[in-house]
């Protein structure tokens, strides 16, 4: 005979196996009766046994209400129960389903057990058989409970955690037995199941890491990046099981990016979910997907979407990622867009990458750019057509001297990344006009500061490492038409000095940039951090300060009277004033035994104080080769006059040091009459080993005068 529990059940408050430091909210469990087998028959039996006159629907409500009451009286601290049908839109982590149907159990003993003795006719042995008692039957009820995970995951992860059956004549006692005995303790059953089955994650959170800081279209490998996504549950554990991985969904259809599942075959794959690809987490790297740039030249922030799911009907979460794609910019930049017949200018072909914030990346060293020049009549140009190889900063230069018949030339440049479907273009024009001024002066200067360093320090309990890079550049070019104001001979030096006044001061080109990147990593025991700081500065509000004052200054050309050629120039250069617009970002993470935290800092400011850059002589002073000593100049002057020095008169020797000059101001090229100039360069290199610390300054000037004698 089936014996039911009649003694009172002592309810003991259960202790959850989950660590007290977990940040897991209470599990929400929806309770409902999902089926009554042989509905009318079972309803009649229930009414008959319990003296009721309920309909089937009312019995369902009655059963659900009693199940909920018993569950709430069981003393679970981290489980919350509610009636699912009364709250159809509520968050539900687990379903507790119940079904009931008719059953029979033994009631009264009709025939008691007895013995039958006989002799086996084959063996001759005496045999005793025991016959079971015979019972009369009575109607009972069999109830089944099923505890099921609610999850929106694809493929389905709605697992059955526990299924229990109980039989009893009284349905109210049946519910007590099922709740307090067969399903006791329910919280520990859930904890044990969750420990063995980490997926789907409870309260999932995604940690997204990108293989590369940005993508570039320059070559095949630079266009790809892997995305690593780990999923944590509310216990702070990364979710992975070799038999039951956590699904992560990668958006696979994007306009500019193409997607590929883990190219290294390190992860298991699942069926696609619409426009999302399903990848299960691996042990070390999480779920892995790859994105590759397939088109486009402009800089963009691509935003793939990632999803994952967990325990709970509303546990699906979606995160918008960010993949920075650098654009390509090809600039054709004449030093001057307007020149005069017979003048010379330089054209810069500049290929560089650019991020969405406008920061430039000098990463195009050695690239080949197709260049074509049209409109040339009788001028000369250093490169008219064909490929040009860019220097270490992605720049090439073309020298152009305008002929007397040139009117306008057009310079076009194109670059197509290998294996890429699109090209980047740049072009510029130079207009040539008759010389309207007595002379023109071009001044160009550049200053660069490059620093790169790294370190690694290993300790018994950890490691520290980092690297630092700084690229700072300022360059400017001025075009200045000149008017001859005055001239005079300097007989003692056998020179003629011509004084020119600027008619205008044109800032032909200006570029400045400041790029700093500082990476640091430290790990000691269970504590550490990893962060990257970047500072990008771009110039704004540029102008020529005190321009009216500078227009009153003089540019002096020193002419050797013996050769009638200019031997040097006296000029202090011209300044450009600007302010730095600065963006500083710090990203990374820190960790300790309690988990990890992201590091995110951002600031954007414009300097209140102005900065000046003045192209001017850069080389160290040398004795001026165009200037003789005073005593020597005096003797030469008297000799040229034909005036003998009296015998009793002596010219004293110079006591002062000889005049010095930056060699940049000496004429180094040209005919010294209509076209001439000079340049200088100074490098300060403090590099040691693999650490780079190099500063470089350059200066260039040239003057073009009318052919007529001035």
Image: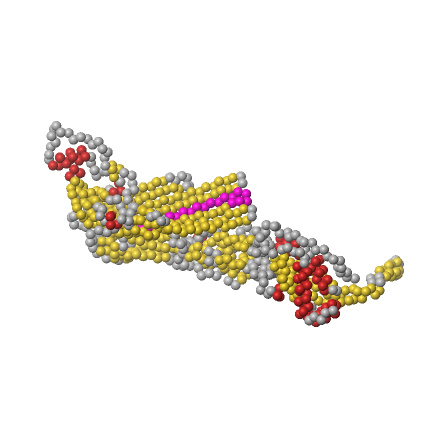
Name the magenta segment's main secondary structure: strand
Name the one closer to the observer, 258 or 123: 258
Name the one closer to the observer, 461 or 372: 461
Residue 583 spot, x, y in % from top left: 40, 51
Residue 566 spot, x, y in % from top left: 20, 44
Q: Residue at x 39, y 51 (%)?
A: 605
Figure quadrant of residue 688: top left
Q: Is residue 514 magenta?
A: yes
Figure quadrant of residue 315: bottom right
Figure quadrant of residue 623: top left
Residue 306 spot, x, y in % from top left: 51, 58
| Total residue callouts | 0
Residue 546 spot, x, y in % from top left: 27, 49
Q: Residue at x 80, y 66 (%)?
A: 136
Residue 155 can be seen in this image: no
Name the one closer to the observer, 532 or 243: 532
Q: Which residues are magenta?
A: 510-528
Residue 695 can be seen in this image: yes
Q: Is residue 324 magenta?
A: no
Q: Quadrant of the N terminus?
A: bottom right
Q: Residue at x 26, y 46 (%)?
A: 573
Display coloring: secondary structure
């Amino acid at each position: 005979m089936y014996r039911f529990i009649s003694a009172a059940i002592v309810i003991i408050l259960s202790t959850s196996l989950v660590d007290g430091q977990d940040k897991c909210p209470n599990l929400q469990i929806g309770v409902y009766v999902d089926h009554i087998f042989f509905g009318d028959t079972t309803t009649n039996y229930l009414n008959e046994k319990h003296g009721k006159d309920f309909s089937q629907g009312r019995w369902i409500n009655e059963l659900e209400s009693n199940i909920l009451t018993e569950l709430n009286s069981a003393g679970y601290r981290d489980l919350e129960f509610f009636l699912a049908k009364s709250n159809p839109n509520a968050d539900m982590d687990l379903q507790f389903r119940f079904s009931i149907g008719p059953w029979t159990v033994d009631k009264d003993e009709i025939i008691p057990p007895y013995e039958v003795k006989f002799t086996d006719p084959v063996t001759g042995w005496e045999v005793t058989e025991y016959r079971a008692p015979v019972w009369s039957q009575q109607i009972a009820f069999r109830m089944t409970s099923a505890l099921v995970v609610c999850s929106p995951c694809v493929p389905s992860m709605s697992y059955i955690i526990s299924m229990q059956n109980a039989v009893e004549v009284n349905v109210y006692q049946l519910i007590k037995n099922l709740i307090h005995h067969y399903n006791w303790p329910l919280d520990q059953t859930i904890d044990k199941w969750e420990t063995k089955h980490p997926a789907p994650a409870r309260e999932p959170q995604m940690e997204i890491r990108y293989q590369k800081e940005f993508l570039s279209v320059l070559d095949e490998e630079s266009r790809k990046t892997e995305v690593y996504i780990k999923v944590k549950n509310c216990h702070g554990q990364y979710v992975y099981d070799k038999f039951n991985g956590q699904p992560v969904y990668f958006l696979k259809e994007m306009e500019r990016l193409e997607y590929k599942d883990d190219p290294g075959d390190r992860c298991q794959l699942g069926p696609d979910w619409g426009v999302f690809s399903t990848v299960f987490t691996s042990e070390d790297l999480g779920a892995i997907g790859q994105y590759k740039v397939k088109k486009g030249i402009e800089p963009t922030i691509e935003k793939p979407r990632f999803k994952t799911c967990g325990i709970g009907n509303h546990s699906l979460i979606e995160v918008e990622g960010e993949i920075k794609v650098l654009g390509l910019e090809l600039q054709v930049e004449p030093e001057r867009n307007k020149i005069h017949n017979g003048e010379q200018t330089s054209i810069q072909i500049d290929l560089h990458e650019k991020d969405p914030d406008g920061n430039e990346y000098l990463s195009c060293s050695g690239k080949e750019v197709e260049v074509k020049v049209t409109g040339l009549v009788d001028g000369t140009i250093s490169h008219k057509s064909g490929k040009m190889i860019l220097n270490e900063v992605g720049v090439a230069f073309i020298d152009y001297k305008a002929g007397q018949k040139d009117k306008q030339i057009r310079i076009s440049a194109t670059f197509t990344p290998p294996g890429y479907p699109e090209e980047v273009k740049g072009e510029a024009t130079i207009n040539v006009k008759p010389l309207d001024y007595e002379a023109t002066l071009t001044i160009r200067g550049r200053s660069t500061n490059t620093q790169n360093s790294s370190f690694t320090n290993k300790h018994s309990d950890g490691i520290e490492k980092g690297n630092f890079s700084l690229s700072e550049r300022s360059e400017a070019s001025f075009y200045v038409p000149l008017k001859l104001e005055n001239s005079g001979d300097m007989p003692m030096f056998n020179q003629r000095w011509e004084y020119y006044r600027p008619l205008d001061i044109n800032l032909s080109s200006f570029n400045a940039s400041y790029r700093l990147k500082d990476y640091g990593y430290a790990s000691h025991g269970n504590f550490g951090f990893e962060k990257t700081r970047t500072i990008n500065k771009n110039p704004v509000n540029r102008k020529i300060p005190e321009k009216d004052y500078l227009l009153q200054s003089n540019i002096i050309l020193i002419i050797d009277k013996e050769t009638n050629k200019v031997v040097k120039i006296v000029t202090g250069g011209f300044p450009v004033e600007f302010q730095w617009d600065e963006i500083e970002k710090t990203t990374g993470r820190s960790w300790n035994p309690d988990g990890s935290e992201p590091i995110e800092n951002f600031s954007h400011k414009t300097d209140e104080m102005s900065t000046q850059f003045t192209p001017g002589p850069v080389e160290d002073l040398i004795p001026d080769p165009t200037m003789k000593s005073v005593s020597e100049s005096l003797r030469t002057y008297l000799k040229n006059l034909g005036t003998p020095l009296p015998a009793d008169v002596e010219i004293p020797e110079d006591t002062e040091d000889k005049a010095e000059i930056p060699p940049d101001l000496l004429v180094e090229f040209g005919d010294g009459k209509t076209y001439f100039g000079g340049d200088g360069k100074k490098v300060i290199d403090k590099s040691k080993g693999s650490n780079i610390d190099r500063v470089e300054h350059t200066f260039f000037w040239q003057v073009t005068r009318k052919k007529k004698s001035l």
